[in-house]
Image: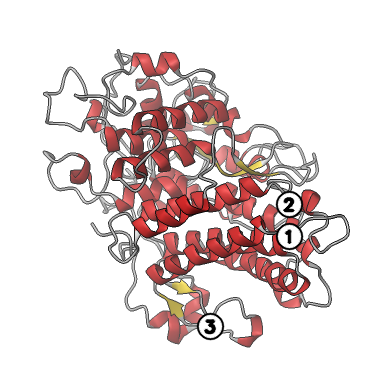
Amino acid sequence: MKLNKLIYGTAMAATLLVASTGCRKSQFNINQNVNSVTDSTVTYDVVLPAALHASGTIVGTAWGPIQNWMGYWARSGTYAPNVTEETYDLTTNFGNGIWNSCYDNNYDYQIVQNKAGGAGATFYEGIARIMKAHNFMILVDVYGNVPYSQAMRGGGNPTPAYDLGINVYRDLFRQLDTGINLIKNAVVSTTNANKGITTNDIIFQGNKGKWVRFANTLKLRMMIHAYAVAGIDKAAEMARITAEGSGFLGIGEDVMVQPGYLADKPNPFYNVYKISVAGAQTANNIYYRANKWGIDYYKYNGDPRTSRFYEAGANGLVGVAYGLPPITDNAAANLAGIGPGLYKTNLSPQTIMTASESFFLQAEARLRGFIATGSTVATLTNTGITESFRYIGAGDPSTYLANNAGYSDVDINAVANSPVNPAGTQPVGGLFTIISQKWFALNGINTLEVWTDYRRMAYNEVVTASPVNDRFVYGVGIGYDPGPPISVSPQNTSTKIPVRYMYPQSEYNYNPTNVGAQGTVDRYTKIFWDLN
């Protein structure tokens, strides 16, 4: 049985980010000003580890607002309200760090791609193409249409045209194919152009199979995002993956950056959200506290991950409704904060993708028929749960699974959500379980993927008897308050979470014709795969 814990009062909020969490390159980057870099001053083997570290920083530190929007974190009462975020009234100056850092990072990968390609260093070139694809996927998923085919030319084209998001996705599949082939066919020796790959590849240390499985899993992520888009041929893409033969990221195969983090060059997540290099509690660690709706949902399920995703404050494992005016009771010290399963240690590797996410993607692909053979939906889903428990350090999920049998946010085979809900009136197992478990698993790890799930899937696709709802709804299917919750800021008049970021003001200043060609864009302008 689920724990008999109900949330009294109105379920609350989500949104925010402190400016210092923008995804910037830091200690390990060789170039802070990309305009000063020339082919004569860098080599591909030096640029690659710096670029990979920067990719980890983007994934690990850029998503504070979405953490709040999706019900994981909230502003503590120690800080004044952030009106822009808590009212969802986004501006062209909101979240610019993602845009800037992804393009900056891809400029480095372009240097690696060009110079490695010219030298015959195919392993390096393959990695660069895969990581560029990873960043462009982020850009499309956050902003929609973006500069792509004319981008990465530096001063050669300072005002690149925008490509349709769907066309970027289509080409990313082919870029990943190219990256896979380059890596699989790479010859590595101590004297040829691929030398040093085991050291300079600070993710997989030159393991070809893991790079290929990562690339295939990125393809699968795009297929799942665009599951309802007729213009992307999922059957053909899956046939290519099957023919290639390496499969997807498997048990224990987390994608993690480890350049050799040190006390004075720490893990990016730890440095931003826990303790600074100087040894002090960071401002973000005080600012971001547990969202009441989110932490109570974990506790409602008796989830052992609660104390790994969150760290008890003076009042225990308690959260705050996002958007509440600051009061002493909600001071940071009283609330649960970011947990040890996320910040780990200052020397820990920085995660880019977990094996848990891979298995949830595979489970949905199996359910939708994109994957036709192999492990069942149930096996893939439960493996995803097990991998989440492993990653976060929560032990064996067996008791958790047993205690939640029959409840469709945990039990993939549930035939009714809850004894208190009539059969057929709420979602049963299947897709509802997969999407719910991704929410439970990716807290603080890959919140962009959770936000994408929320945006891409209408709730009445999952719950055919439900009223029309153009977004996924968490929790309500098993008797918990529906979420993600909306900000309770007194200034908020919106009842909808944004579905995209605005283009940066710099684009309107310096590339006005091309950004203007995208038409009127606001916080509710949909990404191409959002058909709701």
Pointer 2: what residue? 201
Label pair 1/2, CB-CB below 8 angstroms: yes
Query: In the shown orientation, is residue 91 left or right of residue 475?
Result: right
Say which quadrant the C terminus sits in.
Answer: bottom left
Q: CA distance from mark 1 to mark 3?
A: 29 Å
List the single residue furthest toward the right. Answer: 191
Residue type at mark 2 is Asp
Q: Residue at x 54, y 19 (%)?
A: 395
Residue 121 in which image quadrant: bottom right
Q: Residue at x 48, y 60 (%)?
A: 137
From the image, tell me which residue sits under label 1.
Answer: 48
Q: Nearer the viewer's eye, disc 2 or disc 3?
A: 2
Residue at left offset 47%, top offset 40%: 357
User: N-terminal of the two: label 1 or label 2?
Assistant: 1
Q: Residue 141: which quarter of the image?
A: bottom left
Q: Earlier in the sequence, mark 1 or mark 3?
A: 1
- Tell me the residue at 74%/42% (across/down): 266
Instruction: Say if 153 sits above or below 294 in the image.
Output: below
Label 2 environment density (alpha carbons within 10 Å; few <14, some 14–19, many ≥20): many
Question: Which is more foreground, mark 1 or mark 3?
Answer: 1
**Callout 1: helix, strand or loop?**
helix
Q: Is residue 520 left or right of residue 160?
A: left
Q: Name the spot of residue 123 as percent of width and height, x first.
A: 71, 59
Task: Looking at the picture, tell me which residue is in the foreground, 221 or 120.
Answer: 120
Query: In the drawing, does residue 353 fall left or right of residue 282?
Result: left
Residue occupied by mark 3: 510
Q: Quadrant of the N terminus?
A: top left
